[in-house]
Structure formats: structure tokens, C-alpha cells
Amino acid sequence: MRFLLILLNGLLLAFPLLAQKKNETYQLHINRAVSTDQGTSPIVVDGSIDEAAWQAAEVADNFWMVLPMDTSRANVRTDVRMTYDDRNLYLSAVCYHGDVAGPYIVESLRRDWNFGRNDNFIFFMDTFDDQTNGFTFGTNAAGAQWDGLLYEGSKANLSWDNKWTSAVRNYPDRYVIEMAIPFKTIRYKQGITRWGINFGRQDLKTTEKSSWTPIPRQFPTASLAYTGVLVWDQPPPQPGPNISLIPYALTGLTRDYARGIPNKSRFDAGLDAKVAITSSLNLDLTINPDFSQVDVDQQVTNLDRFELFFPERRQFFLENGDQFTNFGYATIRPFFSRRIGLGGVPIRFGARLSGKLNKDWRIGIMDMQTGRVEDMGLNVAPLPTQNFAVVALQRRVFARSNVGVLFVNKQSLGYEPILDKPAYSQYNRNVGFEYNLASANNLWSGKAMYLKSFQPGTRDNDAVYAGNLQFNSRRWLLSGQLESVGKNFTAEAGYVPRRGYERAMGIASYTFLPAGGGIQSHGPLVQSTYFFDPAGRQSDNETYLSYLFTFRSRSTFTGWVATDYVRLLQPFDPTNTSRETLETGSTHHWNAWGTAFTSKPQSLFTYGFTTRYGGYYANGTRLNLTTDVGYRFQPFVSLAVSASYNDIRLPQPWGRTTFWLVGPRFDVTMTNTLYLTTFLQYNEQQKNMNLNARIQWRYKPASDFFLVYTDNYLPSFSPQIGQDVPGLFAVKNRALVLKWTYWWNI
């Protein structure tokens, strides 16, 4: 295994990557807009582009089609203009309707909407022209905003939120968008006059997705490798002193029924600050942060042997967060910010310095301090004060590749272990190196990585070696990955759910592209994964074969078959409900099949389903049925219900076990700044019902009022008698929080 990884590393380093930017000839010239005679802004953001500055601006038009085909010009017309003044970057887009009659299609006025379910316009800025990191802004046809950070060349983190304004005005034959992006909102290098830029448009009525520059259909329009060039008439203006203070204050009531704690009032206040050290390097500070308004996680039925992953949603950890949290792979993350401050552990303060030193160097330094928690439950020692420190350094090489170094330190402060209670480690440290391959044309990508952990009492089998290589063309997707994780490797501030294994995985798929008819594309995919224990013996194998149909209406259908083999390396309850366990060393083999369908997004009524039936552990069977149903009264109301049913049949002592997971969601968006979201989740496996209702009023850009109500129940279970009682809903805990935030630019 290690010999193969060393060979793979050599292949990645030797791969030729020097090439000119793919869409260098697509250039849009941007010129300063002259202020009015009264000294006011030359642009009024109102969805009407009759100002003289717009008439003088160069036009980006004649877009290319990306879907359903990527070989011709777009049929739906889009005209884009850009200009700027001392404070803002301005953009206008005129989005003409196509030949298909009917109103625009949007899901709601909620921010950061689902791309596939909205008529929309988005643009992508590569402000360092490095084809790796950038910003994205856009709106749907009804005016709901979209903003995010771009990372790894094409991925967007929409949890990022910042200060900017926009307006959309609808006409019979078009809708018009105006945006103003403050220079203080984005990061860019002083003195450069070339940015990467691209514009994307989706028109669901005609099922057309288009882009200003030509982009192969297998890549998203966010691919920075395929941006054109925004040519400035002079270097973008410096934003001047760029300090933002973001205070918050909250009050609320909580009650813990399960533990007999009566109503308890709370009042908290804290402060975030953003200080631009340079136009490309930012210092973030936080004191006593609170994240009570963050969206709740969507629950799942967990039948896995290992810990599940839930993404970070807290704003402080997001800007340039990819440099910390995306080091490694999905299941080998030396740093995972959700380890900090969740589960009632208070964050006292923190600081993060992140951004670009120049076009080639990128840096990230973060330090967070949590408080001591005395009450961690029965027979558990108090959680000590802990410090989390992370340092990341990245160097661009070749066209779009980079090499990176990461250091993570989790340290318990003033900690004295108690002999008769579980102890916390004094420290845990990780050091890692990785090379990320990204070819100039985006066809080749890959990674080679090494990690080592340090903790008291461990000196061997504490390293990770991993690498992958992928080729993605219009028709072929070929990928291979190798991993070796030592049994003593530990990442207490990371996410590594499985240790002590070696893994080999291969994927191959082919896409057919019919010239006409109702099918846009179709093709097979085969994937095989093998796990081996530290002695080199096979412990797991899954081989999966699927066939995907994508229709021109944007609906999809997949059918699949799979075969699984598992040799348990530790006891496991196949129902994950703390019942009897299967023995270590027992072997299990089964076959299964399934389907998946999603309906076309143009309809007011949308739906989807998945099915799975086949074998399971101990010669049992498992049936899984899921469905997602939605209806919208556009653009103000969106209703959605998701449901999952599992029927597991095993020999005694388990017998038959069934689980329901139901999650209705209700969104009312009175305007694009006032939302009501209600989310109810019933999880039979966890014996929990959760209600979360949130009102958000964005009274100024990036400044909000939140009213949040949460409720947790123990359905059909009485903690007093310790058994199910039909019809009973025992309240576990409740909370009501009112929170105010204000974004103040100094």
C-alpha cells in the first residue's frame, strides 16, 4: 500500500501543468463611473439601468449554452455590464425570457436558495486570478440573494454572509438585476488590474443553463478554471480603513423538563470584529460568540458503524475556512471546527488571521478558547478549559495546483485527571502535508497527503498516508483512491471516524449524450471499495453498479445494484439502538438493489423518492423507502415534507425493527429580508421529536433580528417508568431566544 502511495505521489508531482488560462480571450473591460454633479453615487440600485454609467459600460453578451448541450450559443439572451466607484463594484444583468411562455420559476425569497429550483443569475469573481478561490453573488428572478465563498476551484460555501445590496425589477419580456458589492466586503490584491470573472444564467422554463465563457457540461459554471478576464482601467480602489464591528445581544428563556430544571432566563452579549490588515488579509476576532440562530441539523436514521458528519454552519468559522477544514478527505479531516464549542461548551474568545499574502501564498492562523464545564453528566469528569490552535500555509504551484502544511493543537489547560472518572487528554496534535493537483483545463485532479498525530503515550502506528487521482472528461469519469490510517492515529479536533485500516477505491463511469429526444444524458457507473485491517486481511468490500438517466426536463432516475461483505472488527448492534450486538470477527454478506428519482423543478409540485431492498447483517433483510414532496406558492410560501421508513428483519434477539423519520418544513418569505421558517423532525430511532421555528428580519444589510423557538419531545416514552406509553409526548426541553445583531463599518 505505501509503495503505491509513493508511486502515486511521484505521478502527481511529475504531471505537466503549465498552460495558459483556458478562456483568456474572453475579456470584459470595466471603467470607473463618474459621480453626478451633486457628488452622489452614479448608480442607484433599484433594478432600473437608465443611468448614464450603464449606457457607457461594455456589455458581456452572446452567452454559451452549458446544458442541455455545451456545443452552441445560448438561446436565452443575457446582457451584463459592470462599473465601479470609490466604494462599490456594480453589476447589472438583463435576463430576457426565452420562447417558452409563463412566469419565472423560483422556490421562495429565502437567501442562498437551491440553484436547481430557481431561475437565476450568478456571477463568479476570482479576485486573485489564481483559479482556486473567489466569491460568488447572485439573485433569483424574484430578488432573493445568493452569496458565498468559492474554494477548490469550483465549490461554493453558501453559509458565508456579508454586506451588499441588490434589486430586481420584472418586465413582460425580461427581469433586470442591479447589485452593489462594497470593496470592503471582498478581498483582493492591491495594484492588480486583472480578475477572473464569469457569469451564469439558469432559465428553467427552457431548461437552459448558460455561461458567458464556454464551459464543458461536466463542470459547474462556478469553475474558476474557465473564467474570463475582468480588465480594470486602473487598479481597483483601496477601501480605506476597513474595520467592522458586529455586536449582538440576546435574551431568552430555557427549561429542561427531563432533568427537572425550571424556567431559566438568560441574557448574553458578545462581539465579532473584522479588521482588514490588507485588502487581501483579514483578522477576525470574537468574544463570547453565540450561534443560537443557526439552522438545525437535518436528522438521519443512523445504521452506520461509525460517527456521522454534519457540516459547519456557524458564521465565524466560514471565511477562508476551507484552508483549515478541507485539508484531507471527507473521512480524514485533521481539523473539524464543529469540535469547538458545541454541546453546551462555551467559547470564550477567538481570533483568526486568514487570506492571501500574494498571488501564490495563502495563510490561515486560528486560536479559540473554550470555557470549563463542570456538569458533564454522571461519572464523567468536568471538561477542562481547552485551547484549539490551527496554522495553515498554502503555496500555489504550476497552473492551479498547490502544496499545503497544516498544524493542529488541542490543549487542556489547568487539567488534573480524576482517577475514578474518564480522563481527557492533556494534548493532541496533528501535523500534515498535502499536494493538491488541479490541471489548467480541469480534467485532472488529485491529492497526495501525509498526516501524523502526537499525544501522550503513543509513538507508533499514528500516521496517515493517502492519495487519489481523477480524470473527468465530457464522457469519462475515472478515479482511484488509496488510504492508510494507523490504529493509533488520533485527531481529537478533527473528523476521522475510522482508524486502523487500509482502503482502496476505484470509480469508472461513462456518459452517453443523445443528439435529441427527451433524454439529455445517460450512462453507467461502477464503484468498488475494499478495506483491510492492520494485518492485511480484508474487512469490508462494497461493489456498486448504477445507471443514471437525466431527462431534458431536468428530472433524473437512477437504478442500482450492490454487493457487500463485512467482517466486524468490534461488536455492533445492527439496529443502533443499544441492544444486543453481533460478535467481533463475525462475517456478513448480502446483495441489494434500489432506485432514485427526482421530478422536474419547473413544476409547483415537486417530488422525489428512493428505494432500497436486500440483505443485511446476520442474514437479515432491510427495506428502506424515502420520499421528498414539495409545493410552492411562489414566491412567498414553500412547503416540503421528507420521510424515511426502514424495516429491518433479523433473527432473534432483534426480530423485526421499524424506524420512521419524518421532517416537514414550512417557509414563508414575506419579502427577501423577512422570513419565517418552521422545521419539525420526528426521529423514531432516537426517540426524539424536534420543533424549530425561526423568524429572521434583515433590517439592514448583514444586520438581523432573530426570534427562535425550539422544542424537544420524547414521543411515546415516559422517563418516569422507563418504557413506551402510546399517545404520550413527554417534553424534554424548550427554549425561546430573541437575538439582535448589527454590522457597523468604521
Image (spheres, rainbow, N blue to C red):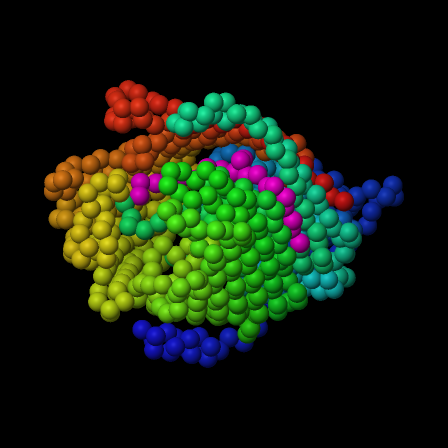
Residue 300 highlighted magenta (yes or no) = yes
Q: Is residue 477 left or right of residue 190?
A: left
**Image coordinates for residue 387, horizontal then vertical, percent:** 55, 53
Q: Is residue 15 above or below residue 716?
A: below
Q: Quadrant of the N terminus?
A: bottom left
**Image coordinates for residue 407, horizontal then vertical, percent:** 52, 63
Q: Is residue 601 left or right of residue 284?
A: left
What main secondary structure does the magenta stretch of the protein show?
loop
638 or 35: nearer the eye?
Answer: 638
**Image coordinates for residue 485, horizontal then vertical, percent:** 35, 65
For the point 86% across and 43% down, the residue is 39
497 or 142: nearer the eye?
Answer: 497
For the point 50% across and 41% down, the residue is 373
For the point 30% across and 20% down, the residue is 728
Q: Count the marks: how many?
A: 0
Q: Is residue 590 above or below residue 458?
A: above
232 or 78: nearer the eye?
Answer: 232
Span of residues in magenta = 283-302
